[in-house]
Image (spheres, rainbow, N blue to C red):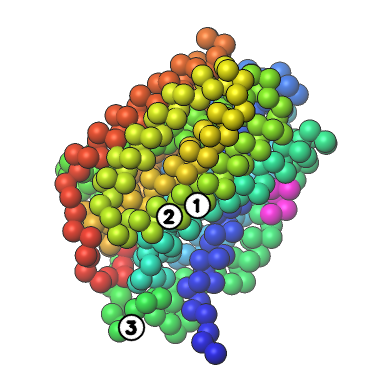
Amino acid sequence: MRRIHYSWVILVITFFTNIVAGIVISSTGVFLTPLEQEFGWDRSIISLAFGITLFLYGLSGPIMAALLEIIGLKKMMTISMATLMVGTILTLFMHEPWQLIIIWGFIFGLGSSVFLTVLSPYIANHWFEKKRGLVVGILTSSTAAGQLILLPVLAAIIEAYSWRHAIGLIMALSVIMFFFIFLFMRNSPREIGLLPYGLEKDVPEEIDTKKENPIIIAFKGLIEALKIKEFWLLAGSFFICGLSTNGLVGTHFISLCISFGIPLVTAASFLSFMGIFNLLGTTLSGWLSDRFDNRWLLFWYYGLRGASLVLLPFALTKGSYVMLIVFTIFYGLDWIATVPPTISISRQIFGIKKSGIIYGWIFASHQIGAAVAAFGGGLIYKYFNTYTWAFFLAGVFCVLASLFVILIKKQNMNLPKQINV
């Protein structure tokens, strides 16, 4: 009987750790209204804390990519999951806005960074020679899986008990995954006497004996990337991607639904329902990114997303659950579908060795966009008492992103067989 390659074990562990890290980020919409009601905090202040989370975990991505190379995969994942554990414990005792900003903004922002920024391409490039696009698609869809499974559960716990009980569930999951990482994670296939999945002939790894400062490594990559037009186009389009997903929909969709009279659990269920199609769409996108021109995939993803965002407030105004379900399916298929083609283009342009850190910077722009929308959405609601303008502007920006990606030079998809990032 043929044994399962250990690369797939690593994939499964990473998938579930990403779920736990991802639910910290994607659950912000569930906690926004309960925190506002219990503490009387201004929505824009809570949105600011959530915005810092998105900004910081994205901005630290390039440094996390460098640290992965320097201190290793297992140690980075162990430290990061421990950080999330500490953050959930501290959340249970907070009672001031500045504590929310420190815990959610900084502790959760740094703790989730390695899982949600550069870990997926790192696993694909170090543990797999074949099926890299599919692997990235599966791993990036893990946040959708967490959203699917856990958001309605968290919302139900909040309604039945309190938001602290919901945080307790996240804390328990982080403890479980901490032990799985500690027991089963490995730094590389060669550490256990294997080659990356699909690699038939051993290729010696380039071992860099110089332990250079990770911040210097990260900024060297940025300086090199800034000279290339395609970096600006990818970073600009990914800024809009973050603005229109994590920042706006991830943070404010549930509050938008509540403002139209939809109950918390129902609104969370719609967001969870998106997760089903997000899982399908992102995995399919990974498969497509191995086979088709990634620029055109991104063109359609951004264009169709923009149309759906513009139409959402009008669907809610009409009180049509049918139209809301259609939006949920349509938007869900598209949510993280942009990630596999963006990673693929980055790898084709910058090479496998440099793409990890440079993609980290591209993802940083994604999270800057997310932070802008998380805070900006709350600010727009504060002054206009509606989210309509926020969703309309996000839709227009998505159309602009579809034009950005078409300007990227077409790349050769047949890359040299390398395994270094």
**Residue bounds of the magenta highlight:** 169-173
Q: CA distance from mark 3 to mark 1?
A: 30 Å
Q: CA distance from mark 3 to mark 2?
A: 26 Å
Q: Amino acid at mark 1?
A: Leu
Specify the quadrant that holds the C terminus. bottom left
According to the picture, the residue beneath numbered tag 3 turns out to be 200
Q: What SS does tag 2 mark?
A: helix
Q: Is residue 98 visible?
A: no
Q: Residue at position x 49%, y 29% from top?
A: 248
Q: Amino acid at mark 2?
A: Leu
According to the picture, the residue beneath numbered tag 2 turns out to be 284
According to the picture, the residue beneath numbered tag 1 turns out to be 280
Residue 355: x and y in percent read 29, 56
> Are the residues at dot 2 and dot 1 in contact (C-beta closer than 8 Å)?
yes
| First-in-chain label (3 vs 2) | 3
Disc 3 crowd, CA 10 A, few/some/many (<14, 14-19, 20+): few
The prevailing secondary structure element of the residues shown in magenta is helix
Residue 98: x and y in percent read 62, 27
| First-in-chain label (3 vs 1) | 3
